[in-house]
Amino acid sequence: MYITSIRTAASLHHENQETVLLIIKEFLNPLTIWIGIGAGVVILGTLVVLVRFRKRQQELPRPTIYLARHCKTAWNSEGRVQGTIDIELSPEGALDAESNLPAIRGVGIQQIVCSTAKRAMQTATIYAHGLGVPLQSSPRFCELDHGEWEGQRIEDLLNLPSSQFERWMADPGAVLIPGSSETALTAQQRILEGVREICSTYSGKMVLVVSHKHILAILSCALEKRPLTQFRNEIVESTLPYKARTQRE
């Protein structure tokens, strides 16, 4: 009798568990379905928004980008490699920037973006004040890290075969700068990302980028889809602005 009662109780307990599980299952089935539908709707909505955003970006007019090297420093006058060394403009360089204003004004620049180096910032600030346009700085447009070459005279490096400077000028992608924190290729990706940011931020505007001659030459190779063996041919010594070549008419 006692054993039968225990078995009966156990059986009832088991049946109750099955009943509870059935109730939970019946409840969860529609709930799971609705959760799945809800998640699908959210994903679909997100995809629609992304597609519309991408389409809108494609429809927006691209900015017209002009490039310019910073004006003269004391090290430029001495023919020294500057790279990441933060040299200020010389008095002559400041005067050069002022004298460039009429040519830049004639282009119709609406926005200036520059390297964070002092020589580029000072050049760009003179331009921005003279034109009355906004200025933004970005480390993406800083000069390539020239490692152990920084501070040395270019003439001395060219006359010293062991420096590898001549070989680097012929093909920056094939020679590593001793002591540098980056390669020509990584620097190229860095400045290209800066150009992409300009394109997404300043749609339809006339933008002047004030940077440095070597990183700008590396950028020009990328924009024109030329190998870095053309680097030397892309170097612009003048500080006057020039249109990025892929956008020249």
Image (cartoon, grey):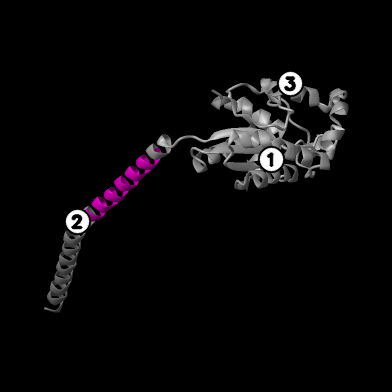
Task: Determine crowd level at label 2: few under 14, some 14-19, many 20+ residues with C-alpha closer than 10 A.
Answer: few
**Quarter placement of the N terminus:** bottom left
Choose the circle earlier in sequence order: 1 or 2: 2
The answer to which quarter of the image holds residue 165 is top right
Choose the circle earlier in sequence order: 3 or 2: 2
Front residue of 241 and 156: 241
**Quarter placement of the C terminus:** top right
Q: For this view, does 143 lie left or right of residue 82?
A: left
178 in relation to 91, above or below: above
Q: Position of residue 188 (x, y in %)?
A: 63, 33
The label nearer to you, 1 versus 2, is 1
In this figure, which residue is indicated by the disc labeled 2?
29
Q: For this view, does 22 lie left or right of residue 61?
A: left
Residue 49 painted magenta: yes
Mark 1: amino acid: Cys
Separation (CA) of disc 1 from disc 2: 59 Å
User: Of the numbered discs in the image, which one, if any, rests on residue 57?
Assistant: none
Residue 169 painted magenta: no
User: Of the numbered discs in the image, which one, if any, rests on residue 170?
Assistant: 3
Mark 3: amino acid: Ala
In this figure, which residue is indicated by the disc labeled 1?
142
Q: Which residues are magenta?
A: 34-54
